Image (spheres, helix red, strand yellow):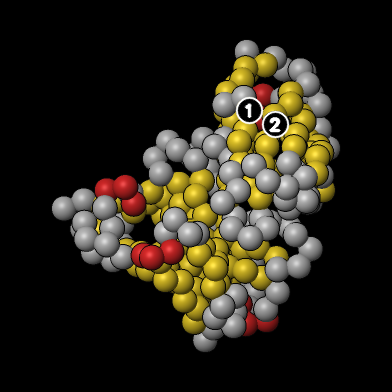
Amino acid sequence: QVQLQESGPGLVKPSQTLSLTCTVSGGSISSGGYYWSWIRQHPGKGLEWIGYIYYSGSTYYNPSLKSRVTISVDTSKNQFSLKLSSVTAADTAVYYCAREPALGGRAFDIWGQGTMVTVSS
Amino acid sequence: DIQMTQSPSSLSASVGDRVTITCRASQGISNYLAWYQQKPGKVPKLLIYAASTLQSGVPSRFSGSGSGTDFTLTISSLQPEDVATYYCQKYNSARTFGQGTKLEIK
């Protein structure tokens, strides 16, 4: 079955760019049919959708983060990535990647385990 | 932006109770509504999508209803393993989650 795994630095300095990668196994991003999202959860708080990418490269970002977010896809590696620029302590969170079927309205049906990112000097 | 508001923010109920959680959208979202369960320290799990369709493998005591702006998640007979925080989420246009409802056993 399809599995997602986040990877990247657990500590980022303020004002720098947070970079994470999600590796998809058990299925191919390039086969289409799914949106690939990033979602975050601040410590002890709720869930915040960051944005998604389709295998073609088309993206849709949360308007509140759009100015700082870039999501990209590398179909040759079966990965998609998140870059969040100019980070502050408010970007400290667990970051999840997740899959959403593009048709049939099935929401986020598969999630990665999440990776904690702390923004601190 | 469409806001999603859940109520209550927390609740305590006894094993065997019928539990209802409400989610309201600030504008109509048809049935583009999902419910997730997140147990402490765990990854969110999809319970229901399209407002009322049970995700495969989810116990039948969970059910969802609603359309437009008002939605409910119902647990017909609360079990100890249902202790968790529950989130609603809309998935038309920008994806947005509700603030969560923390469910505890009395």
Relative height, residue B82 to residue A19 (above, below): above
How many numbered marks are there? 2
Question: Is B68 situated left or right of A117 in this image?
Answer: right
| Dot placed on the residue nearer the N-terminal end, 1 or 2 | 1
User: Label 2 belongs to which residue?
Assistant: B22
Q: Secondary structure at mark 2?
A: strand
Residue at image x 73%, y 47%? B28
Disc 2 sits on a residue from what chain?
A: B
In the rendering, which numbered label is found on residue B102?
Answer: none
- Image coordinates of residue A50 in percent, x first then y, are 48, 59
Quarter of the image for residue A37 reads: bottom right
* Residue A92 seen in this snapshot: yes
| Vertical position of residue B4 compared to residue A17: above or below | above
Q: Evaluate if marks 1 and 2 touch, with contact meaning CB atoms under 8 Å apart.
A: yes
Callout 2 crowding tier (Cα within 10 Å): few <14, some 14–19, many ≥20 = some
Q: Identify the secondary structure beneath mark 1.
A: strand
Q: Residue at x 47, y 76 (%)?
A: A72
